[in-house]
Each structure stands twice: as structure tokens, then as C-alpha cells.
Image: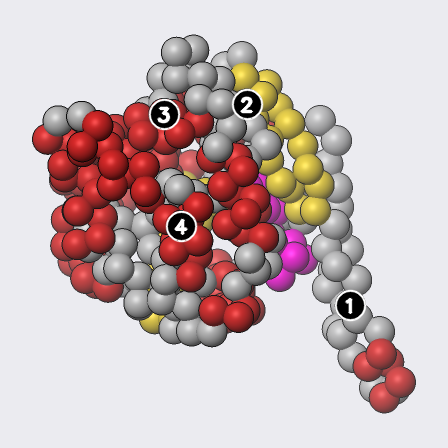
């Protein structure tokens, strides 16, 4: 596998006023595939592989493309890897008949990518689905995880908002056409657009390509059923919350929490709950919702650099 060594950051403006017309060179981001457990896993890579690694784990309904505003702001100081899970983005999307769409399986493929890339240590950046995937990796191999960056990713019942409960609890009680209906709405175009816009400080700053591209991928043959399977399987994450919390207390990883405080899916109580088990964590509130990077990537990058750089 080829790797890229990205030059150090060059300031956007020099002492010559005319230099203001020239932007700093953007960090090179490479788009790669690896065969993991017989499936093609897509990932974005930037930065020097000799630098500390950040493993960026995305949420629903998107893919690693959610990190596009952030990766160039980190690549001068970190080695950044951002994979798409099976069934998401540019990774393989087998039918539910050919693949077990469960969080155990998604985590197994991310762990396989970590092994293929030879990553011995990494800080986990987790948003939404990235939480249960990353926390599985942490529980299985805590010696590899050098820290957490948590963005609206939940590990506490306190953090599950009414919006999430109204979709998930009926589905978990029994999967029928009636209980599937709210979940199907969540992964419809209207629901995907809502994910991106809910709680945004200025909706005009949110790129509408997000929900159009995400929805096109969600609507591929078999993918609606696959994502229903994952929403049903999310109950396995809730069952693991006590184990993850015990692991937090036992290992005390360095932790930065950057939380969109107007998220109705994973509510602010979920961010504060981490402080019970990780009392040294830094909690930063952002004027945003479930997604924050379109509006707050520079602030998030600065916090990451200050905490882990």
C-alpha cells in the first residue's frame, strides 16, 4: 500500500500583503480501498503515517465524507484514516441476504482495516454510529486506543433523546410494518435532510449535497432493508453500555467531547454523562445539532490539536 507524506502547513498569508491572494496548499487526501474479510472497504487517508493516527468513524446517514471539512485541518500534524463501513459510502454494499448488518460486523471490518494498515495506536474520533463501533474496538483492544474524541456519539441511556426513542423502541419491541414505518422515515430523503439540518446554527452553511448524496446511497438495491436491520440491531449497543462505561473507568483514556448542543437525537445529557466515568474529559459545547463540522470544523480541529497534538 502506498502512503503519502504531506508537507507541513504553510501559513495562508505571508508578510507581503500581496501574498493574501494565495491560499495555503491543501493537504493531499487519498482515496483508497482495502480487502477486509473478503469485502472492499473504502477509506480516506491524509498526513504522514509516522505521525499520531486519528481514526475517524462516521455516523448515520452519511459516510466518511462527513469529515471532508476536518481532514485538511488536521493532516499537517496527524495521520488521518476515515473508513466507510460496509453498506455505507464507497465500501461494498452487499444485500442483507449476503451480509449480517450488525454493529459487531461493522466493527469487525473496521478492526480488520486497522490490522491491514498496521495501526498500532490511534485516537478514535466517533460520531453517532461511530460510537458503538469505536467502543467495541476499545473494549476489544484498549491498549491500541490512545484517546477519544466524541461528537454526538452515545454510551448512556441519559443521552437517548425522545426523537431516537420514538423510532427505536417500537422497532425493538417487535419488527412489523407498523413499527418499521418511523425507521423508514428516518432513512428517507426527508429524514436524511433532517439529520443534517436539525440544530444547525445557520442552515445556509450546510451543503445540500450531503442529503442528496447520502440518500442516493441509502436507496441502492437492498440498502433500505440493510439499514433497518442496523436500526433494529442498535439495541445491542444499549445492552453494552454498562460494559463500555466500566471500560472507561478502568482505562481512563484521554477524552475530548465536542457536542452539538441542539441535537434532539443524542441530547446534551449524554455528553455530560461521560464525565461520571471520565472526570478528566474536556467537554466543549458547539452551537449545532447532530452534525457540526460544516459550521465548526476549525473550532473542532483547534480543540483536537490542543488536546492531542
- Residue 195 left/right relative to 275: right
Q: Residues within 10 Å of mark 4 (few under 14, many from 20)?
A: few
Rendered-image quadrant of the N terminus: top right
Q: Which marked residue is nearer to the observer: mark 3 or mark 1?
A: 3
Q: Is residue 145 above or below residue 19?
A: above
| Residue 80 lies in the magenta-colored region | yes
Q: Residues within 10 Å of mark 1 (few under 14, many from 20)?
A: few
The dot on residue 229 is: none
Q: According to the image, label 4 marks what residue?
A: 190
The dot on residue 24 is: 1
Q: Is residue 141 above or below residue 192?
A: above
Q: What residue is shown at x 49% (from left), y 23% (from top)?
A: 221
Q: Which marked residue is nearer to the observer: mark 4 or mark 1?
A: 4
Q: What residue is shown at x 40% (from left), y 50% (from top)?
A: 190
When asked about the image quadrant of residue 58, the answer is top left
Q: Which residues are magenta?
A: 70-83
Looking at the picture, how far across and down is residue 282, in whole percent?
33, 66
Contact check, label 3 and label 4, Cβ < 8 Å? no
Q: What residue is shown at x 39% (from left), y 11% (from top)?
A: 97
Q: According to the image, label 2 marks what residue?
A: 92
Q: Residues within 10 Å of mark 3 (few under 14, many from 20)?
A: some
Q: Which marked residue is nearer to the observer: mark 2 or mark 1?
A: 2
Looking at the picture, how far across and down is residue 265, in whole percent?
27, 54
Q: Is residue 144 above or below residue 255?
A: above
Amino acid at each position: 500500500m502506498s502512503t503519502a507524506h504531506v508537507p507541513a502547513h504553510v501559513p495562508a498569508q505571508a508578510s507581503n500583503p500581496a501574498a493574501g491572494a494565495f491560499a495555503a496548499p491543501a493537504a493531499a487526501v487519498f482515496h483508497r480501498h482495502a480487502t477486509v474479510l473478503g469485502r472492499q472497504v473504502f477509506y480516506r487517508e491524509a498526513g504522514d503515517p509516522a505521525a499520531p493516527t486519528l481514526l475517524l468513524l462516521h455516523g448515520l446517514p452519511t459516510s466518511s465524507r462527513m469529515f471532508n471539512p476536518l481532514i485538511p485541518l488536521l493532516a499537517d500534524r496527524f495521520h488521518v484514516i476515515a473508513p466507510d463501513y460496509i453498506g455505507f459510502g464507497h465500501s461494498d454494499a452487499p444485500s442483507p441476504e449476503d451480509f449480517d448488518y450488525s454493529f459487531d460486523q461493522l466493527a469487525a471490518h473496521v478492526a480488520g482495516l486497522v490490522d491491514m494498515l498496521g495501526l498500532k495506536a490511534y485516537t478514535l474520533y466517533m460520531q453517532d454510529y461511530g460510537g458503538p463501533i469505536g467502543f467495541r474496538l476499545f473494549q476489544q483492544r484498549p491498549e491500541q486506543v490512545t484517546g477519544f474524541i466524541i461528537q454526538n456519539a452515545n454510551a448512556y441511556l441519559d443521552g437517548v433523546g425522545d426523537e431516537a426513542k420514538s423510532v427505536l423502541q417500537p422497532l425493538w419491541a417487535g419488527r412489523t410494518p407498523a413499527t418499521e414505518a418511523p425507521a423508514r422515515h428516518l432513512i428517507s430523503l426527508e429524514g436524511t435532510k433532517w439529520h443534517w439540518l436539525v440544530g444547525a446554527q445557520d442552515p445556509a452553511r450546510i451543503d445540500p449535497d450531503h442529503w442528496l448524496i447520502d440518500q442516493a446511497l441509502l436507496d441502492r438495491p437492498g440498502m433500505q432493508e440493510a439499514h433497518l436491520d442496523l436500526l433494529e440491531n442498535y439495541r445491542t449497543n444499549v445492552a453494552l453500555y454498562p460494559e463500555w462505561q466500566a471500560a472507561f473507568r478502568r482505562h481512563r483514556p484521554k477524552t475530548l467531547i465536542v457536542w452539538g448542543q441542539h441535537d434532539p437525537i443524542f441530547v446534551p445529557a449524554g455528553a455530560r454523562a461521560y464525565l461520571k466515568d471520565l472526570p478528566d474529559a474536556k467537554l466543549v459545547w458547539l452551537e449545532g445539532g447532530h452534525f457540526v463540522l460544516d459550521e465548526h470544523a476549525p473550532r473542532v480541529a483547534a480543540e483536537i490539536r490542543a488536546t492531542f497534538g
